[in-house]
Amino acid sequence: MKKITYLIAIISAMTINLAFADDIEDVVVSASILGSSSEIDNPVHLILEEDFNKFGTHSLGESIDTLLGVSNTDYGSMVGQPVIRGLSGARIKVLENGLVNRDVSGIGADHPIDIDMNNIQQVEIVRGASSLLYSNGALGGIVNLVDNTITKEDFSEQEIKLGFEHNSVNDGKVHNINFSDNLQGINLTLAYKHSNFNNFEIPDEAVIHEPGETHEERDNIENSDAKTAAYKAGISIVEDWGYFGLSLKNIENVYGIPFHGEHDEAEIAQYGEERIESSTDSDTVNLKGSYNISSDFLNQIDYFYSDTDYELVELHIGGKHNGEATTFLNDAQELGAMLDLSNDALTQKVIIRSMEEDTSILGEEAFMENVESEETSFGYYLSRGFSSFDLDFGIRRDEVNRKSKVGATAYDKDFDSTSYVLGFGFDLSSTTDLSLSFGSAERAPSSVEMFMNGAHAAVQRFEVGNPNMKAEESRNIDLGLSFDNEIVYGSINFYQNEVDNYIYRKDTGQIDNAGSEPSKLQIANFVQKDAELDGYEIQVGKDFDFLNGNLGVTIGRDSVNGTFTDGSNIPRMVPARDIYTLSYTEDNLSVDIDLTEVNAQPDFGSDGDSFTAGFELLDLSISRSFLVEGVEDFKVVLFANNLLDEIARNHSSTVKNEVPLPGKNLGIGFRVTL
């Protein structure tokens, strides 16, 4: 917290006595990872804040899992990680304002993505050439959350936002307050969010027990409660020469682990019930700026520095292991610059990045030695429009070094990789566009995949990594067609992805019985095998004049098949889905209905994977703005999730049987803008 204290002092010093600001110009604020350079329709979703929050507060993965090609892998309601076209984990990068989020979500399936979704402007899910500028190893794509903590344009007026939300499924409460203003040339943002969720309810007979277990059926998931407090503050100065800004973020979570392995009845009788509780505390400091040069060769330099200190403590409360704790630490620094070499004929950008990260696990379940990672990246992006087509090209060179040890053996491993994407966009007619892209992306094995060596209760495995792993290499083809003829609109996307040296966890069939206190867990090794993924996304829609407003209807389907080259299935591959949406808008009224039909998944792989039944999720959101004197906007939102109270479970989840998705939830929210 020392850095946070210093930065609060800096912000206070820069803003004191500025409460009475003079005239401020009106400026429209916008932000996007893609910018305005590319005319090619990359596989991308862009969700504005009002749409992102219309169904209540959820984890990041759950918030975006109704988008075509995007789904969620969960470990209870607190933990939700995105899956894009069947790829997850380290193959998906989560960013905030273009900077990679640094936490330990990749170390354990029960670890949350440490990101603050309060006061955002939009969420972007991006694949294609431009994504190579922002992260390495993102074989599946990137998810970028954009806010104005460091704004690049002056605020035009003071704005205060207040919010409150209540959920029935967990008696959950959320409240937030956000402030932004320009105080004599200095842009200031402050944001705070607090949430408190109790154990969430589930439908009857939703839990699937292992054979021989005699646990009673329950109407909620024990230890699925969670509390979060998140703070963000930022300042920026915007001038003709560019901008400069500084931000700080602190997130603290306390949440129960809803499944951490079952104890036998005799042990429970002797020691009592056990609760596993995790608490996280992270501080992130970002420095960003831009300098306009406007020379014949170089237009602009964007630069950044990010420092993250992250801590997660897993504590046993009650039971045989009462008081035992495991601490996960991650300390990361990243800096870099992006050079804009664009001219009237084409867009050109060059990126240089450097990152150092120190990850360690201390305590009772320290299943991996300290890992030191260094990454250096060089990227180039080009976009140009021709008379008959548009072209995007991105290439990236990454040099990754990881140092650790397994037992008494020390390892110092280097991975040098090159990734590229070449994309074409064609205007077939005034209503129809065609896009085609080819790419090859490489990913260095993660710290866990290389150096894991111990009992991991969250997944009920004794996991063993392989320090001699090779880098994954993905070769993919994307073909997309989009149309809008004023009668119907839609898109069709087909893709094929061949991944050499695909990394996954494989059960050995052996049990860990070594040592004085063996874990008695099944031993699972991280191994590699060539894999193939192919799939499609299809969506059609139409808008109608209905009553006194507009009614929009869309029907979509996504499907991905994942197999190894020997014909066996990739474990936990997401099933096909049909997604129906209905949206009605009239003046200050908005009604949204989403129905997601998730197919059964009979194609399961190894590593404890099993059949998952299909289900239907029906979500409803009704929002209405009211005129209130002295208030810019007063909005009431009524929402319902899983309105049919379906038994639902994500096939990609390692605890899908023990921790199904929440049951029916009715919620209400109030959002006030002053």
Image: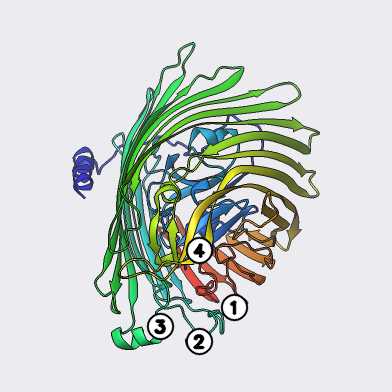
How packed mark 2 is, by other alpha carbons closer than 10 Å (few <14, some 14-19, many 20 or more), is few
Assess whether mark 1 and mark 4 are in contact (beta carbons under 8 angstroms).
no
Q: CA distance from mark 4 to mark 1?
A: 18 Å
Label drawn at residue 157:
none
Q: Quadrant of residue 557?
A: bottom right
Q: CA distance from mark 1 to mark 3?
A: 31 Å
Q: CA distance from mark 1 to mark 2?
A: 17 Å
Q: Nearer the viewer, residue 493 or 21?
A: 493
- Name which of mark 1 and mark 3 comes first in the sequence: 3
Q: Nearer the viewer, residue 107 or 258?
A: 107
**Tag 1 residue:** 645
Secondary structure, mark 1, is loop
Q: CA distance from mark 2 to mark 3?
A: 17 Å
- Name which of mark 2 and mark 3 comes first in the sequence: 2
Q: Quadrant of residue 402?
A: top left
Q: Is 471 placed above or below 506 here?
A: above
Q: Which residue: 63% across, 28% down?
A: 392
Q: Is 48 placed above or below 413 here?
A: below
Label drawn at residue 217:
2
Q: Please give left or right for residue 162 compared with residue 610 in the image.
A: left
Secondary structure, mark 2, is loop
Disc 1 marks which amino acid?
Answer: Asp
- Name which of mark 4 and mark 1 comes first in the sequence: 4
Q: CA distance from mark 3 to mark 4?
A: 26 Å
Q: How many marks?
A: 4
**Tag 3 residue:** 264
How packed mark 3 is, by other alpha carbons closer than 10 Å (few <14, some 14-19, many 20 or more), is few
Q: Please give left or right for residue 315 compared with residue 341 in the image.
A: left
